[in-house]
Image (cartoon, helix red, strand yellow):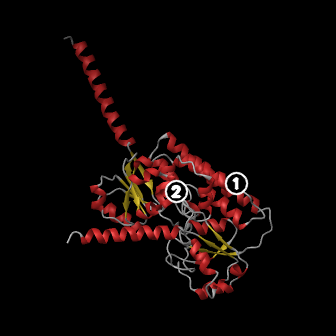
C-alpha cells in the first residue's frame, strides 16, 4: 500500500474515532438533566425515567401530561379515593405506597425516580443512592412562586415535545384563570372579608386548617380574602375554638373528604354557632376529584373558577361543570356524566353517597382482612 493511501486511511480512522468519541460524549451529556426541586436542592438525574414513585402532590399532573405509564405507584391515600378509579381506571395497576417508604422497597421495585413529599425523606433516600426530588404541598414562605414549579419540573425531566406542550398549556390555563378572576374583582369596591379554611382530609375538627405556605392560603388571598392561614406558621395548623371565635370569620370554606361532616358539625356545635359566618350561612365547600382541589392539581384552574362562583355569586357565573368535563376528558381520557360532576361539586362519592363513610368502610375492610389473614398464619 502506498504512503499516500496509508495516510488517507489513517486520517479516516482518526476522524471516525473522533466522531465516535464525540457522539458518546454528547449522548452521555444529553441524557442527564439538573433540576432544582421545591426545597431549592439541585440534583442531576437521567432524563425520561421509566418507573416513578409518587407522593400525593405529584400523581395527577403526571397523568395529565401523558406520563401515567411511567408511574409505578403512589401514596395509598390517593388510591383509596374512589374518584381516582373513575378519573383514571389504570390506577388499579399502581402500587399503594405509604407516606414514607424504605429505600430497600424502591430498589426491589426497580424505581428510578421518587417524587418525595418532604426534604427529610428526600435526603434519606439520596443518602442511600435513590434519585429523589421533593414535590411538596407547601412553598417557602408562601406558595406564590411555586404554582408552576412541578409542571416545569416535569417538562425538564421528560423533554418530549408533547410533554412540553402539555406543561405550557396547563401553566397558561392556570394563569388565565387567576387573571380572569382578579381582573374582574379589581372592578368592584369590595370589603376585605375574613375567611377560615377547614382542612378535611382528616377528621380533626373545625379548627384543623393549614398554614401560610399552602396552596389554599395562596388561592384565597388571590381571591381577595384575609385568610387566617396567612397568620399561621409551619405546624401551626390547629386553631382553638377560642382563637377562632376571636377571629370571627365572615366566611368558612370546607374541603376534603370530611367537608360535609364538618358543615353539619359547625351548625350544631357551640361556640361555633355564635360566629357571623354560621349565623349568616356563609359556609362553602370545595369540589372533590382525584386530588383535593384546594391542593395544586390538574384541575386547579377549575378550582379557582368554582370558588369564585361560590364566594362571589353576584359577580361570577362560570360554567364550571363543562370546564371539568372537558379537562377530565383531555387529561385522563374519561367522559364524566353530568351527574358525576354534580357529585364532585357537592363533595360526594361517585355514587352520590358520603365520601368519608365510603373511605372509612374501605379502611375497616382492609383492617379486618389484614387481621383475618394474620390470624390464619398461626
Q: Which mark is residue 348?
A: none
Residue shown at the point (74%, 58%) measured from the top left: 317
Asked whether, in this view, residue 19 is left or right of residue 351, the answer is left
The kind of secondary structure element at disc 2 is helix
Question: Residue 88's spot in the image, x, y percent?
Answer: 48, 52
Crowd tier of the residue under label 1, counting other residues whose Cα lies within 10 Å: few below 14, some 14–19, many 20 or above:
few
Q: Is residue 276 visible?
A: yes
Disc 2: which residue: 149
Asked whether, in this view, residue 298 is left or right of residue 251, the answer is left
Closer to the camera, 69 or 228? 69
Crowd tier of the residue under label 2, counting other residues whose Cα lies within 10 Å: few below 14, some 14–19, many 20 or above:
some
The correct choice, above or below, for 88 with respect to 238 in the image is: above
Residue shown at the point (28%, 56%) measured from the top left: 107
Q: Nearer the viewer, mark 2 or mark 1?
A: 1
Residue shown at the point (74%, 66%) measured from the top left: 312
The correct choice, above or below, for 77 with respect to 149 in the image is: below
Residue shown at the point (65%, 68%) measured from the top left: 221
Closer to the camera, 127 or 243? 243
Name which quarter of the figure residue 298 lies in: bottom right
Closer to the camera, 343 or 282? 343
Q: Is residue 39 visible?
A: no
Tell me if label 2 and label 1 are in contact, CB under 8 Å. Answer: no
Query: Which quadrant of the figure contains the C terminus?
Result: bottom left
Disc 1: which residue: 319
Question: Residue 47's spot in the image, x, y percent?
Answer: 40, 46
Query: Which quadrant of the figure contains the N terminus?
Result: top left
The kind of secondary structure element at disc 1 is loop
Amino acid at each position: 500500500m502506498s504512503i499516500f493511501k496509508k495516510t488517507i486511511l489513517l486520517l479516516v480512522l482518526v476522524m471516525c474515532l473522533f466522531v465516535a468519541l464525540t457522539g458518546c460524549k454528547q449522548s452521555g451529556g444529553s441524557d442527564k438533566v439538573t433540576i432544582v426541586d421545591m426545597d431549592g436542592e439541585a440534583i442531576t438525574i437521567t432524563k425520561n425515567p421509566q418507573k416513578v414513585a409518587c407522593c400525593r402532590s405529584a400523581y395527577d399532573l403526571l397523568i395529565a401530561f401523558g406520563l401515567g405509564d411511567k408511574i409505578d405507584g403512589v401514596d395509598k391515600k390517593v388510591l383509596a379515593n374512589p374518584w381516582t378509579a373513575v378519573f383514571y381506571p389504570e390506577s388499579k395497576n399502581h402500587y399503594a405506597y405509604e407516606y414514607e417508604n424504605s429505600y430497600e422497597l424502591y430498589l426491589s421495585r426497580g424505581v428510578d425516580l421518587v417524587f418525595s413529599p418532604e426534604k427529610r425523606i428526600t435526603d434519606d433516600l439520596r443518602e442511600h443512592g435513590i434519585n429523589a426530588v421533593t414535590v411538596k404541598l407547601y412553598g417557602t414562605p408562601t406558595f406564590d412562586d411555586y404554582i408552576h414549579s412541578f409542571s416545569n419540573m416535569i417538562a425538564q425531566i421528560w423533554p418530549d415535545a408533547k410533554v412540553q406542550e402539555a406543561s405550557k398549556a396547563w401553566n397558561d390555563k392556570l394563569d388565565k384563570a387567576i387573571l380572569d378572576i382578579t381582573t374582574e374583582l379589581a372592578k368592584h369596591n369590595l370589603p376585605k372579608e375574613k375567611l377560615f379554611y377547614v382542612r378535611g382530609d382528616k377528621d380533626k375538627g373545625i379548627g384543623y386548617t393549614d398554614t401560610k405556605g399552602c396552596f389554599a392560603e395562596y388561592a384565597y388571598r388571590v381571591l381577595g380574602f384575609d385568610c387566617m392561614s396567612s397568620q399561621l406558621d409551619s405546624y401551626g395548623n390547629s386553631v382553638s375554638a377560642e382563637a377562632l371565635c376571636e377571629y370571627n370569620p365572615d366566611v368558612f370554606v370546607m374541603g376534603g373528604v370530611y367537608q360535609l361532616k364538618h358543615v353539619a358539625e359547625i351548625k350544631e356545635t357551640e361556640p361555633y354557632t355564635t360566629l357571623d359566618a354560621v349565623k349568616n350561612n356563609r359556609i362553602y365547600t370545595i369540589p372533590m376529584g382525584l386530588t383535593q382541589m384546594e391542593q395544586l392539581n390538574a384541575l386547579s384552574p377549575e378550582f379557582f373558577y368554582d370558588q369564585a362562583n361560590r364566594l362571589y355569586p353576584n359577580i361570577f357565573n362560570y360554567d364550571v361543570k363543562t370546564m371539568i368535563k372537558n379537562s377530565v376528558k383531555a387529561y385522563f381520557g374519561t367522559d364524566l356524566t353530568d351527574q358525576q360532576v354534580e357529585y364532585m361539586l357537592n363533595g360526594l362519592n361517585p355514587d352520590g353517597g358520603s365520601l368519608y363513610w365510603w373511605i372509612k368502610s374501605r379502611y375497616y375492610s382492609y383492617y379486618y382482612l389484614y387481621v383475618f389473614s394474620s390470624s390464619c398464619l398461626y
